């Protein structure tokens, strides 16, 4: 899921977190070409040993700052409905779950989100 082309083409919105010269997390996102006020977070990962230390929060805050300076006022992202910790994290970060026609385990979900039978919880956050 970590592709070098993201960094090559989306340098301002692909960020790394380091500690003692080692990568402990990253966020990969981009600016929407179709919707000029939107940005999208594609993937975020934090080393399990570094979780709970604010690394994810810092990456999201820096991404928000970067896309805001680039003229974007909305961030979108998704997660799987089974990832309860991810859903709680996004909610704490000020994201709201977008309403959908379907539900899964009490959550609004988008069925076949990515064309591969992916059921996703869809978030948005206004800056």
Image (spheres, helix red, strand yellow):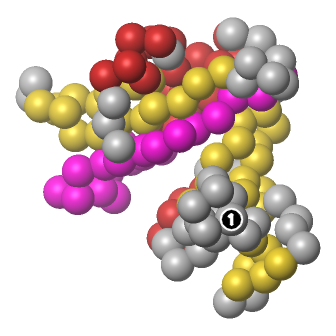
Q: Position of residue 81 (x, y in %)?
A: 60, 74
Q: Residues within 10 Å of mark 1 (few under 14, many from 20)?
A: few
Please say whether residue 109 is visible from this viewpoint: yes
Residue for point 83% across, 18% down: 36
Direction from residue 55 to residue 39 in the image, left or right: right
Please say whether residue 92 is visible from this viewpoint: no
Q: Position of residue 63 (x, y in %)?
A: 55, 27
Give above or below for 84 relative to 125: below
Which residue is disc 1 drawn over? 112
Please give the range of residues in magenta. 37-58
- Res 25 → quadrant: top left
Is residue 48 located in the magenta-colored stretch of the structure? yes
Give above or below for 66 relative to 87: above
Is residue 3 located in the magenta-colored stretch of the structure? no
- Res 102 → quadrant: bottom right
Give above or below for 95 relative to 105: above
Quadrant of the image for the C terminus? top right
Residue for point 69% across, 10% down: 70
Direction from residue 40 to residue 61 in the image, left or right: left
Residue for point 10% across, 24% down: 21
Residue for point 54% across, 30% down: 29
Judge by depth and name the residue closer to the eye, 4 or 49: 4
Secondary element at tag 1: loop
Quadrant of the image for the N terminus? top left
- Mark count: 1
Q: Position of residue 6 (x, y in %)?
A: 42, 23
Give above or below for 8 relative to 65: above
């Amino acid at each position: 899921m970590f592709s070098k082309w993201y960094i090559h083409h989306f340098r301002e919105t692909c960020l790394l977190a380091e500690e003692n010269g080692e990568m402990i997390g990253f966020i990969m996102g981009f600016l929407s070409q179709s919707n000029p006020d939107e940005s999208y977070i594609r993937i975020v990962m934090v080393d399990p040993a570094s979780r709970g230390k604010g690394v994810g929060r810092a990456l999201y805050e820096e991404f928000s700052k970067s896309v805001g300076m680039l003229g974007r006022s909305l961030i979108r992202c998704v997660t799987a409905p089974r990832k309860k910790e991810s859903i709680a994290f996004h909610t704490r970060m000020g994201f709201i779950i977008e309403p959908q026609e379907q539900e899964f385990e009490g959550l609004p979900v988008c069925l076949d989100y990515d064309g591969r039978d992916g059921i996703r919880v869809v978030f948005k956050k206004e800056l």
